[in-house]
Amino acid sequence: MLDLTKKFQLKEEIVLRKIDSKCWALNVENGNQYRLNEVSYLILDSFRDASTVEEMIAIVKKEYAVDKERLIADCSLMIQTAVDKNILKEV
């Protein structure tokens, strides 16, 4: 299970962009682009400044009516993917 007290931050070389309903994470150092859905964008955007997972969960839960346990499970997978792709870093 995801540790809610862990802090993550968007890596310095990552820029988030949203145009209408299309969202991306762009790596300005290597040119990699990652297409995001709106929920993934909101999750990553909440980590612009170092935030705990619990703080991010509260932000997302405010926007979307979803069960907290389901949200934690989905966020766990999304955060791990973002760390693996060098979008997020643990701080």
Image: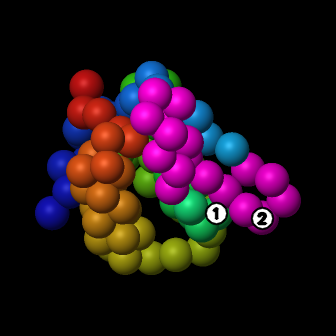
| Residue 6 image-quadrant placement | top left
Above/below status of 73 relative to 7:
below
Please state which of residues 30 and 34 is positioned toward the viewer in this rendering. Answer: 30
- What segment carries the magenta color? 18-34
Q: Which residue is found at the position 36% from the left and 70% from the top?
A: 74
At label 1, the amino acid type is Glu
Question: Left of 62 or right of it: where is 88?
Answer: left
Q: Which residue is found at the position 69% from the left and 44% from the top?
A: 17
Residue under circle 1?
A: 38
Residue under circle 2?
A: 21
Q: Which residue is found at the position 29% from the left and 34% from the top?
A: 89
The tag on residue 17 is none
Above/below status of 20 relative to 71:
above
| Residue 16 image-quadrant placement | top right
Give coordinates of residue 55: x percent, y percent. Answer: 44, 41
- The way the protein has been coloured in the rendering is rainbow
Give coordinates of residue 5: x percent, y percent. Answer: 24, 39
Disc 2/disc 1 C-alpha distance (Å): 7 Å
Please state which of residues 31 and 49 is positioned toward the viewer in this rendering. Answer: 31
Q: Which residue is found at the position 32% from the left and 41% from the top?
A: 86
Question: Left of 64 or right of it: where is 21?
Answer: right
Give coordinates of residue 35: x percent, y percent. Answer: 56, 61
Q: Earlier in the sequence, mark 2 or mark 1?
A: 2
* Count of numbered tags: 2
* Res 65 seen here: yes
